[in-house]
Image (cartoon, helix red, strand yellow):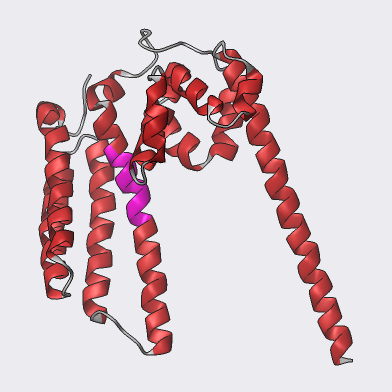
């Protein structure tokens, strides 16, 4: 009887596993069919979308970026930021928003690639008037990319911290003070809210981000993290200021008109 139960459980598990991998393959096929159409819309060979490395070169051309950027995709960390930048430019060259490229194409490609491949969307091309909105043009590519990076990477780090914290509670092996870890999670939530506020052209988002950076730097020192981590936290705020200060007069809650 026990053997029969295990056999039934294994069969159910195999069934759902098969369904899962079938859905994965269908999504992969959907993405590549969509990419084929996107490449053709941009005047590139559709078959180029399935050729490794060559498809990246063509994608860079669609984004209006030089082919040598391909080399940068082999640098860890840089490749993630670069992919967001390129996807933003691709979206803008199809008349879509920066969020469409930075968030949609970068992290939800199985949804946004088919949308970009739809017949209603036309390829505008790099530098053509009307390809991007005034707000996004004023925000700038690097500030846009940096904010999208924050809105994606910080929730991921919070999720990882929550898993680590609950795992430590289960094993009774806390590495860092529990209160300190929860405070750092709250501060990172402030980061996310601040990034959204800055995206919406609110000055208080910059102030909140700065206050959060100072608090997180102090928390890292208390928790015994290396001084490099403290410098990295403060460096994020410095980078944000470098992007925001040239647009400070626009940070009034309304953005450019």
Instruction: Measuring from the top left, give residue 186's x and y in whole percent.
Output: 25, 65
Quadrant in the picture for residue 112: top right
In the image, the segment drawn in magenta is 146-155
| Residue at the image point whose x is 35% and y is 87% from the top | 173
Location of the C terminus (image quadrant): top left
The verdict on residue 38 being magenta is no
Q: Examine the rendering and report whether any part of residue 50 can be seen.
A: yes
The vertical placement of 157 against 114, above or below, is below
Depth check: 189 or 59 in front?
Answer: 59
The vertical placement of 108 against 32, above or below, is below
Quadrant in the picture for residue 54: top right
Q: Main secondary structure of the magenta part?
A: helix
Q: Is residue 168 left or right of residue 210?
A: right
The vertical placement of 175 against 248, above or below, is below
| Residue at the image point whose x is 60% and y is 26% from the top | 49
Depth check: 228 or 21 in front?
Answer: 228
Q: Is residue 200 left or right of residue 167?
A: left
Q: Examine the rendering and report whether any part of residue 119 can be seen.
A: no
Instruction: Measuring from the top left, give residue 159's x and y in whole percent.
Output: 40, 63
């Amino acid at each position: 009887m026990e053997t029969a139960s295990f056999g039934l459980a294994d069969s159910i598990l195999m069934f759902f596993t098969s369904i899962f991998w079938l859905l994965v393959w269908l999504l992969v096929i959907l993405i590549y069919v969509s990419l084929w159409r996107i490449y053709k819309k941009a005047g590139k060979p559709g078959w180029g979308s399935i050729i490794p490395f060559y498809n990246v070169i063509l994608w860079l051309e669609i984004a209006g970026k030089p082919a040598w950027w391909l080399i940068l995709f082999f640098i860890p960390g840089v490749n993630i930021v670069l992919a967001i930048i390129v996807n933003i430019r691709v979206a803008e060259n199809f008349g879509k928003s920066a969020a469409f490229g930075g968030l949609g194409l970068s992290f939800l490609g199985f949804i946004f690639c088919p949308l970009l491949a739809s017949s209603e969307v036309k390829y505008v091309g790099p530098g053509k008037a009307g390809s991007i909105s005034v707000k996004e043009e004023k925000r700038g590519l690097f500030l846009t990319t940096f904010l999208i990076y924050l809105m994606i990477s910080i929730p991921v780090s919070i999720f990882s911290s929550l898993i680590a914290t609950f795992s430590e509670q289960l094993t009774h092996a806390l590495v860092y003070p529990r209160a300190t870890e929860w405070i750092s999670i709250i501060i990172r939530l402030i980061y996310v809210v601040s990034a959204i506020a800055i995206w919406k052209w609110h000055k208080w988002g910059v102030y909140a981000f700065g206050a959060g950076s100072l608090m997180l730097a102090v928390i890292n020192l208390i928790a015994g993290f290396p001084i490099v981590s403290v410098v990295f936290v403060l460096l994020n705020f410095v980078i944000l200021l470098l992007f925001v200060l040239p647009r400070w007069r626009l940070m009034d809650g309304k953005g450019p008109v």
